[in-house]
């Protein structure tokens, strides 16, 4: 066995060792993302939470799991392009990972494994892994758009902007998506 095999095996074990409490596996590949999720994820429910009709306009939920997986891939790719348009930052060669975790505690557990401290939020983007970790129990289109904005911002600039600037830009993306979909609270 060659050196490349061991590097692959180590990388594979390291990535999935971050999820000891969940059975996380690849759900679907899209143009811009490899999408991983916990076992028994209800993709139809997730698509409704993400307001997929807003992004795909004429699509509808089918009955087969292949249809919902394709819709999920199309929805996340459309959201990526929408966020790119909002920021006016376009990286057509981008490909990252999204980990759809069960809940906020699962997100906190992954954060703790990387940083050794608790995390009270429902999602985060980790530039070093080019990965978004997000709670499916709390997911919204705006929240996922916010994290995708971090991914785009971090990859667009040679030197990523400071965290505060990124938060302002990602917050604007979330605001714009919520305003566009009519989910902005008054």
Image: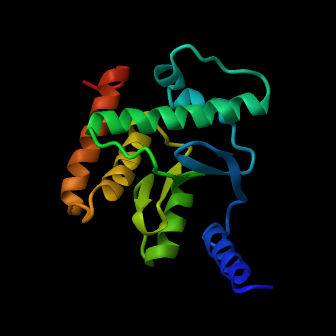
Q: Is residue 158 above or below residue 53?
A: below
Quadrant the N terminus occupies: bottom right
Q: Outermost residue toward the top?
A: 58
At x 51% / y 31%, what residue is drawn? Answer: 50
182 left or right of 7 in image? left
Q: In the figure, is residue 56 to the left or right of 143?
A: right
Tell me: residue 72, above or below residue 10.
Answer: above
Q: Position of residue 143 (x, y in %)?
A: 40, 42
Q: Residue 68's spot in the image, x, y percent?
A: 69, 30
Picture quarter with the C terminus: top left
Near-viewer residue (74 or 14): 74
**In this picture, is 98 found above or below 171?**
below
Q: Residue at x 34, y 30 (%)?
A: 177
Q: Nearer the viewer, residue 96 or 112?
A: 96
Q: Residue at x 25, y 52 (%)?
A: 167
Query: What residue is at 41 percent from the left and 35 percent from the top?
Result: 81
Depth order, front residue of 70/107: 70
Q: Is residue 183 visible?
A: yes
Foreground pick, 22 / 77: 77
Q: Residue 57: x percent and y percent?
A: 51, 16
Q: How is the image coloured?
A: rainbow
User: Can you give x and y, in whole percent of width and height, for residue 156 in the image?
Assistant: 31, 54
Residue 55 is left or right of residue 13, and the answer is left
């Amino acid at each position: 066995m060659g050196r490349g095999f061991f590097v692959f095996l180590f990388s594979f074990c390291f990535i999935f060792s971050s999820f000891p409490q969940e059975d996380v596996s690849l759900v679907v590949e899209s143009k811009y993302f490899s999408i991983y999720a916990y076992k028994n994820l209800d993709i139809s429910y997730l698509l409704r939470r993400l307001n997929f009709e807003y992004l795909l306009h004429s699509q509808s939920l089918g009955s087969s799991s292949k249809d919902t997986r394709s819709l999920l891939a199309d929805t996340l790719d459309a959201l990526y392009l929408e966020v790119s348009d909002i920021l006016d930052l376009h990286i057509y060669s981008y490909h990252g990972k999204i980990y759809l975790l069960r809940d906020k505690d699962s997100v906190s557990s992954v954060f703790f494994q990387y940083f050794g401290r608790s995390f009270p939020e429902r999602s985060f983007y980790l530039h070093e892994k080019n990965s978004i970790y997000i709670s499916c129990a709390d997911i919204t289109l705006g929240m996922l758009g916010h994290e995708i904005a971090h991914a785009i911002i971090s990859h667009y600039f040679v030197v990523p902007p400071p965290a505060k600037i990124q938060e302002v830009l990602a917050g604007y993306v979330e605001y714009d998506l919520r305003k566009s979909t009519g989910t902005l609270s008054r």
